[in-house]
Image (cartoon, grey):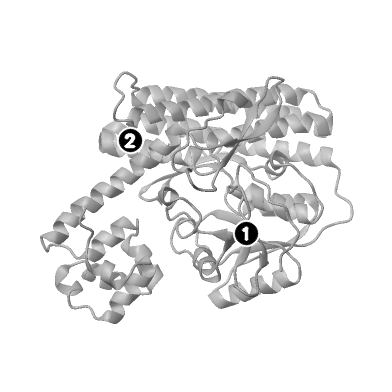
C-alpha cells in the first residue's frame, strides 16, 4: 500500500517534508514559499550547547518549529507525537498510513542506510516523509528530499533511526502529520507580509546578543580569540564545524540565504510589492558573502595550499561585515513590511 | 550565486543517490533550483572532522596492541560514540562502560555483555574483540 505522492527534491529536509505533506492535501507551495512563510531564516551561536564538543551554530530555526509555524499560519490542524515505547511508535505509524495519511518523521542520520558513510554523524534532526508500507516485506516507502528518488527502508532500520539516542535533541520517535485542512486558505498577501515581519523582527531586534544578526557579530568577536584560546588545530576544527553547519548535507547558512532570496522574489509576484525585488538582490549578495566565507575557511585547513592563507582576524572582519549587512538588511525589511501591514 | 556557479564537485556523493539542491540566480536575475553534486569546501570540512577521528582511532589502536586499552575504546571512537551515548544505547551504566574500557575488565566479559555492545555498534562479537590491522 502506497499513497500517491510524487517525489520532489528540496534544498532542506524539513522544508521538503513539510511541503510534501502539504502537497498531498492539495496545497501547492514552492519550497522557498514554505521556508519564508515559516520564518525559517535565523542565526544563533550558542557556546553553551555543544555538538561533539564544539559550540552550536545554527542558521535556521529549531527543528519542529517549522511545521508548527506554517500550519498555524495556514489554519491547518496538525498533530505531533513522541513515544516512550518503540513498538507503539511503529504501530501508530502503520495505523496512520492505513488511514491514508502521510507522516513526517524526525530521524537520526547515523544509521540511515542510504546516506554515504562519510556523512554519518550522530545528528538527530533529519526529516523524512513516510508514504507507504509494503505488507509483504515490511518495508516502508520514504520520500527524502536530499535523495534523487523514492527509497525504501526496512522496519528495523526505521525503528533504529527514529529512536537514535543522544545528540542535541532527544528524538523519541517524533512524528507529525496533518489532520485536516481548511476549505479556503487565508489571504496570501497578509501571510507573506506577516511572516516577513516576524523573520526580520527576530533577526534584527531580539534583545539577546547570541541570536539574530547580532549573533553573527558575536561569533565574529569570538572567532578572533579562538587561535589564542585553544591552539591552532582546535581552532581549525571549530572552523570546520562552522563550515559543516553552513553547508551540511542539503543546505546550510548560505543556502538558506539564497532560499530566502528566492522567497522574496516570489513574494513580489504574490503581493505585488516591487520593493522586495531589491531586497531579494541584497539577500543574494549576503548569501554570496557567506559562501565566500566558507570557501576561505576551507583554504585555511587545506594542508596543501600555502599560497592562500587567512588569519583569524581576517575571518572575524569578514563575519563582522556580514553581520552588519544582515542587521541593516533586516531593519530595513522590518520597516517596509510594517508599513504595508498597516 | 549564479546558476553556472553552482558547484559540481563530485566526491562523496559518487555512486549514491544523494544530491543537493541549490537556489541560484539565472541570467534574468530569477531564482532557480539547481541540483549540485557537492562542493569542495564542504567535503574538506568533512575530511578534517574525519581525520581527527581517524587519528584518535590510530592512537587508541596502538594502545590496544600494547594491552593498555580494551578494543571497546577503539570501537567507540570509530563509531564517534561517547560513553554517555553508549550508555543510552545499551542501558548499561556509564561507570560500567568506563570500567570495560580497561583491558583487565574487558577480558573477563561474558558473551552476553559483549553481545550487547556488538548490537549497539552493529558489528559482530568477533569484530568487537579485536582492532583492525591497518
- Image height of A5 relative to A249, above or below: below
Q: Is residue A242 left or right of residue A23?
A: left
Q: Which one is earlier in the sequence, the residue at label 1 or at label 2?
A: 1
Q: Which mark is residue A142?
A: 1
Tell me the CA gap for discs 1 and 2: 37 Å
Q: Secondary structure at mark 1?
A: strand
Q: Dot 1: few (<14), some (14–19), or many (≥20) neighbours within 10 Å?
A: many
Chain to which the residue tagged by mark 2 belongs: A
Residue drawn at x 49%, y 42% as measured from the top left: A248
Observer-nearest of A79 and A323: A79
Residue beneath label 2, please? Answer: A236
- Number of marks: 2
Chain to which the residue tagged by mark 1 belongs: A
Q: Is residue B67 visible?
A: yes
Q: Secondary structure at mark 2?
A: helix
- Image height of A155 relative to A121, above or below: below
In terms of image quadrants, where is residue A202? top right
Q: Nearer the viewer, mark 1 or mark 2?
A: 1
Residue drawn at x 28%, y 75% as measured from the top left: B114
- Image height of A66 relative to A302, above or below: below
Give coordinates of residue B131: x percent, y percent.
22, 61
Tell me whether marks 1 and 2 sit on the same chain. Answer: yes
Q: Is residue A112 left or right of residue B111?
A: right
Amino acid at each position: 500500500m502506497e499513497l500517491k505522492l510524487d517525489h520532489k527534491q528540496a534544498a532542506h529536509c524539513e522544508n521538503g517534508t513539510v511541503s510534501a505533506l502539504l502537497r498531498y492535501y492539495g496545497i501547492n507551495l514552492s519550497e522557498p514559499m514554505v521556508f519564508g512563510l515559516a520564518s525559517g531564516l535565523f542565526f544563533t551561536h550558542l557556546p553553551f550547547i555543544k555538538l561533539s564538543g564544539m559550540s552550536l551554530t545554527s542558521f535556521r530555526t529549531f527543528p519542529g518549529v517549522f511545521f508548527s509555524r506554517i500550519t498555524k499560519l495556514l489554519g491547518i490542524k496538525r498533530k505531533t507525537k513522541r513515544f516512550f515505547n518503540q513498538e507503539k511508535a511503529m504501530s501508530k505509524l502503520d495505523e496512520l498510513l492505513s488511514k491514508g495519511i502521510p507522516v513526517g518523521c524526525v530521524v537520526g542520520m547515523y544509521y540511515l542506510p542510504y546516506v554515504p558513510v562519510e556523512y554519518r554523524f550522530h545528528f538527530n534532526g533529519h526529516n523524512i516523509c513516510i508514504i507507504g508500507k509494503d505488507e509483504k516485506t515490511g518495508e516502508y516507502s520514504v520520500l527524502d528530499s536530499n535523495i534523487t528518488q523514492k527509497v525504501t527502508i526496512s522496519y528495523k532500520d526505521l525503528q533504529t533511526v527514529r529512536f537514535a539516542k543522544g545528540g542535541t535533541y532527544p528524538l523519541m520517535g517524533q512524528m507529525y502529520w496533518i489532520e485536516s485542512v481548511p476549505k479556503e486558505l487565508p489571504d496570501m498577501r497578509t501571510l507573506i507580509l506577516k511572516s516577513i515581519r516576524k523573520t526580520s523582527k527576530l533577526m534584527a531586534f531580539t534583545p539577546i546578543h547570541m541570536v539574530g544578526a547580532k549573533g553573527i557579530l558575536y561569533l565574529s568577536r569570538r572567532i578572533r580569540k579562538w587561535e589564542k584560546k585553544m591552539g591552532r588545530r582546535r581552532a581549525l576544527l571549530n572552523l570546520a564545524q562552522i563550515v559543516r553547519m553552513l553547508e551540511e548535507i542539503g543546505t546550510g547558512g548560505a543556502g538558506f540565504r539564497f532560499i530566502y532570496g528566492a522567497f522574496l522574489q516570489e513574494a513580489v509576484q504574490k503581493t505585488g510589492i516591487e520593493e522586495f525585488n531589491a531586497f531579494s538582490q541584497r539577500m543574494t549578495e549576503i548569501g554570496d558573502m557567506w559562501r565566500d566565507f566558507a570557501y576561505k575557511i576551507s583554504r585555511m585547513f587545506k594542508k596543501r595550499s600555502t599560497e592562500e592563507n587567512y588569519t583569524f582576524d581576517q575571518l572575524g572582519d569578514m563575519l563582522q561585515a556580514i553581520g552588519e549587512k544582515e542587521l541593516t538588511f533586516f531593519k530595513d525589511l522590518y520597516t517596509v513590511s510594517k508599513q504595508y501591514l498597516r | 550565486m549564479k546558476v553556472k556557479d553552482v558547484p559540481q564537485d563530485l566526491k562523496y556523493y559518487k555512486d549514491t543517490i544523494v544530491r543537493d539542491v541549490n537556489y541560484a540566480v539565472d541570467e534574468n536575475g530569477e531564482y532557480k533550483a539547481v541540483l549540485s553534486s557537492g562542493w569542495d569546501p564542504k567535503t574538506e570540512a568533512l575530511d578534517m572532522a574525519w581525520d581527527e577521528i581517524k587519528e584518535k582511532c590510530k592512537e587508541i589502536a596502538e594502545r590496544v596492541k600494547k594491552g593498555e586499552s580494551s578494543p571497546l575504546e577503539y570501537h567507540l571512537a570509530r563509531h564517534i560514540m561517547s560513553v554517555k551515548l553508549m550508555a543510552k544505547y545499551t542501558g548499561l551504566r556509564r561507570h560500567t562502560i568506563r570500567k570495560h574500557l580497561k583491558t583487565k575488565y574487558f577480558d573477563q566479559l561474558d558473551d552476553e555483555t559483549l553481545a550487547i555492545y556488538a548490537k549497539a555498534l552493529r558489528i559482530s562479537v568477533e569484530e568487537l574483540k579485536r582492532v583492525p590491522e591497518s
